[in-house]
Image (cartoon, grey):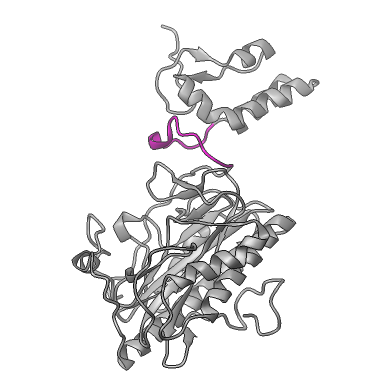
Amino acid sequence: MAEQKTCGVCGKPSTLRCPKCVSLGLPDSFFCSQACFKTQWPTHKLIHEVAAAGGLSASTLAAVAAAAAPKYHDPRFVGYEFTGEVRPHPLSPRRAVPAEIPRPDYADSPTGEPRSEMQLRGNNAVEVKTPEQIAGMREACRVAREVIDCAAKAIKPGVTTDEIDRVVHEATISRGAYPSPLNYRCFPKSVCTSVNEVICHGIPDARPLREGDIVNVDVTCFYKGYHGDLNETYPVGEIDEASKLLIQATYESLRAAIAVCKPGVRYREIGDVISKSVRPHSLSVVNSYCGHGIGRLFHTAPNVPHYAKNKAVGFMRAGHTFTIEPMINAGSYHDELWPDEWTAVTRDGKRSAQFEHTLLITDTGVEVLTERTANSYHYWFLGPENK
């Protein structure tokens, strides 16, 4: 009985062979459909390019074919047309949180539903924090800042985003905190890591970071009953000038937005400030995701859009706590969602950057609860104060 051939992408029985491989005398590559062939084409074509160079032995060509072959299969992605270069990789098992660490209501839920948030759906009232609650927010945000600074030190070429997740997870639980993303609506990891064209909510996996990448790390810690939330975008080794501009402009747009925050300011004004800040650089503002209220709940009122002429409701008042987290794209503002229903990417495949702080409106202005410190990653465009 002849050996049954299987698709190199999905593993189904297959009879279709790559005609170019046949004409070049390369090792057999089988696909079950045009959809699977198209999914693998960006890496499969590398085999043809190497073979066309000539002068290579059969064993070398076989090694190239093996290296270009798919190493990970997720059936949800069969036929999906990726917009950029990032691909999903295998996930490690969910990391455990010690039983004695207090956790939000969704942490152990099989559905991951944040019940407390669901009860307030449609309620636009923004909580005015008491002095006791503000003290709790300061502690949670301090922990989150310490954790993200630990993550930043781990970033270098060759390190996987799963390793960043491990660093964040261990730094969080070592401080007696719960990593807020873990099991939130069934998110499988303790941090979001978004590489290159990934806008937000990237799932840490076995993909190694590469020289020239950019990666956003989004940390939220639940500590003594309160969430502290922030994120930053980091270079991986040496990056190109366009990526440097993108990171700097995104950071400066966040700072510009923070600068106008005080009692009486409309939440909708934040988007006007951010858009005005990035427009001279021909960058665009993502519309689909926004900042949010935060406290005992991970996400609550108000919604804080980052784009101009938005319809956000409400005014800032002393005691409000919320995030501003602009996502800025090098190309179009349009986004789409991967089939994993988490990973948001730019539709044109160009890069995206993001920065986030948790803020408290005071009687006279604003306090950045997740402010950078001397121990934070030092960006090339910041002065000695590192802010």
The picture quadrant where one finds residue 190 is: bottom left
Residue 167 versus residue 200: which sits nearer the camera? 200
Image coords of residue 363 (percent x, y):
41, 93
**Residue at the left extreme, as displayed:** 119
Asked if residue 282 shows in the view, the reply is yes
Image coords of residue 250 (percent x, y):
59, 65
The quarter of the image holding the N terminus is top left
Q: Main secondary structure of the magenta part?
A: loop
Magenta segment range? 70-84
**Residue at the top extreme, as displayed:** 1
The residue drawn where x is 46% and y is 68% is: 219
Asked if residue 167 shows in the view, the reply is no
The quarter of the image holding the C terminus is bottom right
Image coords of residue 161 (percent x, y):
52, 56
- Whether 211 is among the magenta residues is no
The residue drawn where x is 54% and y is 81% is: 259
The picture quadrant where one finds residue 131 is: bottom left
Picture layout, residue 244 above or below residue 64: below
Residue 193 versus residue 83: which sits nearer the camera? 83
